[in-house]
Amino acid sequence: MSGAVVVVGAGVAGSAAALAAARGGARVVVLDGGAGASTLWTGAVDSAAGDLAEGSRAVAEALGVRLEPSLLVTTSFHARLAHGRDASLLDLHPLLDARARVGVVRVARPGWDADEIVRAGGQGFVAVGASLLRHADEGSLADAELAARHDDDGRLGWLGERLREALARAGAEVGGLLLPPSLGVERARAAELSSRVGVACGEALGLPGGPAGLRFEHARDRAFAAAGIAMRRGRVRGVSAAGPSAGGAGARWRLDVDGEGLDAGAVVLAAGGLIGGGLEYQPSEAMEASALPPRSRPAYRCTVEGPWSLAARGRPLDAPGSLFGVPPEDLCWPLAADPLADRVGVATSEGRVVAEPARGAAAPARFAPALYAAGDVVADARRSWLEALDAGVRAGHAAARDVVTGASVRPSPAEASATRP
């Protein structure tokens, strides 16, 4: 893949980078190391990213997400505003604007209590008894498994009939129906169900690991196929400057993918944070059990070796002064007001990886050429879906420019020295 953009990670940030790079005219390959934080997504898009990069909205739409202000409800009836949503979630804004009542489907499912939601919601909500479950095992299936059954058109049609019957029995005028997370895995089925029933239908926000994250993965795979993006399964162990034996004049980087070499003209690191697997907690005291550690080291490391360093709060991540590391209570919420775990990541500036931090005013920071990072792996980044998507789009645009304009050549001796880990 010399002269191509290689994206490490297939979550929100990596997917956005890949789609942006492909739209910029680059050949793109995505390396997927397995399920990460994006697969656990519940479907709400939180935190505005300011002015979005050109193409961010189109990328979000390709990933099955609607970037529009939304009022969502959780399964425990916590109403919350969001900046966007998965297409199967029910947005209450249009219903409230029309002063329409929301029918909450009463069904025996773990974690779902329609009557409690109605009590919490007040007069604008009414419980509606309906046969959502068709088989005996569906009362205990995981949300994603039940949602997968509604990928079938026949099963969705059966559900639509049951909901129409329930509305006729209830005799209540409702403008929308709120269901537990259950409307499709391969794609969002809320719009089609709404058409069948005659009122807006959608899911409540569920727990991490539900159908919304799986819908994201299917939408991503469809978008990659449409854009001609190749996706390869494998764990990236390291990224290093390409040597003279690298294939093609456009090869600037060599990636170690499960022991095999892969050349690239530009690389976008989007391997995720502590949840996604791109960062790892590895304090000094974990080196040897019941023994004094032989040396001190930072509490965190990037799981992909490369020409970068970790940082937090705008400065390089230092090794602790004690061989026994940093007190764990200083690292995480709620005991730390500004926890290091929320800040740590790869040092970057506007998405470019910092190869060598600044050493005073006379020596500015040096950047690794054609090497970018996006998403939760980046130091001091705001950990939100929209921030990850927007940062990925910006990194993908920049990486595409590197390879399409011919800037992606092997590093000069000065660049090679700057990109040594």
Image (cartoon, helix red, strand yellow):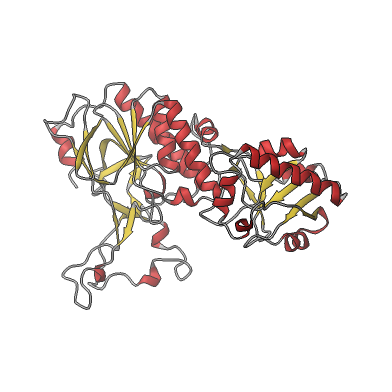
Is residue 46 in sight in this rendering?
no
Q: Quadrant of residue 221?
A: top left
Who's the residue at 83% across and 45% down the image? 99
Number of marks in the rendered image: 0
Q: Position of residue 335 (x, y in %)?
A: 46, 71
Whether residue 66 is situated above or below residue 288 in the rendered picture? above
Q: Residue most toward the bottom?
A: 290
Query: With respect to residue 144, does 227 lie above or below?
Result: above
Among the 4 quarters of the image, the one containing residue 106: bottom right
Q: Is residue 156 visible?
A: yes
Q: Residue at left 22%, top 72%?
A: 323
Lateral position of residue 384 relative to residue 361, left or right: right
Say which residue appears at 27% left-offset and 49% top-offset.
304
> Residue 310, image x and y in percent?
30, 53
The N terminus appears in which quarter of the rendering?
top left
Residue at the extreme right: 171
331 or 115, which is in the foreground? 115
Q: Position of residue 346 (x, y in %)?
A: 32, 49
Where in the figure is residue 51, as x and y percent of width and height? 53, 36
Image point (39%, 61%), residue name: 340
| Along the line of sight, the residue nearer the viewer: 186 or 377 | 186
- Residue that extends furthest to the front in the rendered view of this protein: 136
Q: Nearer the viewer, residue 99 or 344?
A: 99
